[in-house]
Image (tube, helix red, strand yellow):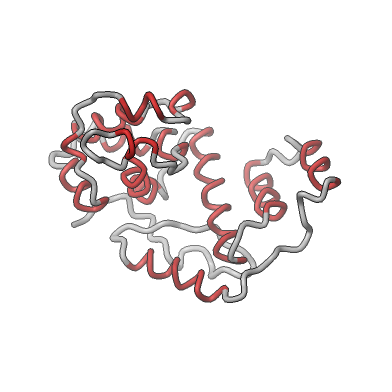
């Protein structure tokens, strides 16, 4: 496995979080609502980064399971928001070949963001339909979807915010600030795939 010297310092610069200051107290992992589903718990991700094990982290499920609740940051005695570090790692992880489970989690992220970018908010039926088609799991959870539709929880037509251009400008601005970029899922209203993605996995700066 390739070791990248200085990785923690470079990630600290990109995320704005003092990755080097983590001393493995474990408070982040003990409070994380997703830790039980992760292959590497938040504190283990941090020590891997401190040891320069970038490939192990980028190939993990953990970075895609983080929900950004900021429990880790509120519990950390050194004020490290691991959620922000995870955001940077997710951007770096796009374009990598992943094992099946991690690939599906990443795909869900892409479809979620693509829906927000296209409509200003998530349109669950279309987002889930695109996700199911791409994963090939067309009929999984179909009965749940039917029940939600009958109860009026799913709407066939997406609700749109008044000024979708502002939403797209937010995405555009976020992509422009990053030396590596995120491939947001394409939709009928979104630019073609690849406009904001170069599949870069190299941290620069």
Q: How many marks?
A: 0
Which image quadrant: the N terminus? top left
Q: Is residue 109 left or right of residue 143?
A: left
In depth, the one of 34 and 185 nearer the eye is: 34
Q: What residue is drawn where x is 38% and y is 64%?
A: 174
State the residue lying farthest toward the left: 5
Q: Is residue 57 left or right of residue 52?
A: right
Residue 47, image quadrant: top left
Counting from the top left corner in percent of width and height, residue 189 is at 61, 70
In depth, the one of 123 and 187 nearer the eye is: 123
In depth, the one of 182 and 55 nearer the eye is: 182
Residue 27, image quadrant: top left
Q: What residue is drawn where x is 33% and y is 30%?
A: 28
Counting from the top left corner in percent of width and height, residue 35 is at 43, 27
Q: What residue is drawn where x is 78% and y is 58%?
A: 156
Q: Is residue 18 left or right of residue 75?
A: left
Residue 45, image quadrant: top left
Counting from the top left corner in percent of width and height, residue 154 is at 76, 51
Q: Is residue 199 above or below residue 148?
A: below
Counting from the top left corner in percent of width and height, residue 26 is at 29, 24
Q: Is residue 41 above or below residue 157?
A: above
Q: Is residue 93 left or right of residue 167?
A: left
Which image quadrant: the C terminus? bottom left
State the residue lying farthest toward the right: 150
Q: What residue is drawn where x is 54% and y is 68%?
A: 192
Q: Is residue 160 above or below residue 152?
A: below
């Amino acid at each position: 496995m390739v070791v990248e010297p200085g990785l923690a310092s470079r990630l600290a610069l990109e995320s704005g979080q003092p990755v080097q200051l983590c001393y493995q107290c474990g408070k982040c992992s003990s409070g994380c609502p997703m830790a039980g589903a992760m292959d590497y718990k938040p504190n283990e991700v941090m020590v891997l980064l401190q040891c320069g094990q970038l490939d192990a982290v980028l190939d993990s499920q953990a970075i895609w399971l983080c929900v950004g609740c900021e429990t880790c940051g509120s519990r950390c005695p050194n004020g490290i928001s691991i959620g922000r570090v995870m955001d940077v790692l997710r951007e770096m992880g796009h374009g990598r070949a992943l094992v099946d489970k991690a690939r599906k989690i990443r795909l869900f992220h892409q479809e979620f963001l693509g829906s927000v970018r296209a409509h200003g908010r998530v349109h669950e039926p279309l987002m889930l339909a695109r996700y199911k088609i791409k994963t090939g799991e067309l009929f999984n959870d179909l009965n749940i979807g039917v029940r939600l539709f009958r109860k009026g929880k799913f709407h066939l037509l997406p609700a749109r915010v008044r000024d979708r251009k502002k939403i797209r400008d937010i995405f555009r601005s976020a992509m422009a600030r990053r030396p590596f970029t995120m491939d947001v899922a394409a939709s009928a209203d979104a630019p073609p795939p690849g406009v904001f993605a170069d599949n870069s996995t190299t941290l620069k700066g």
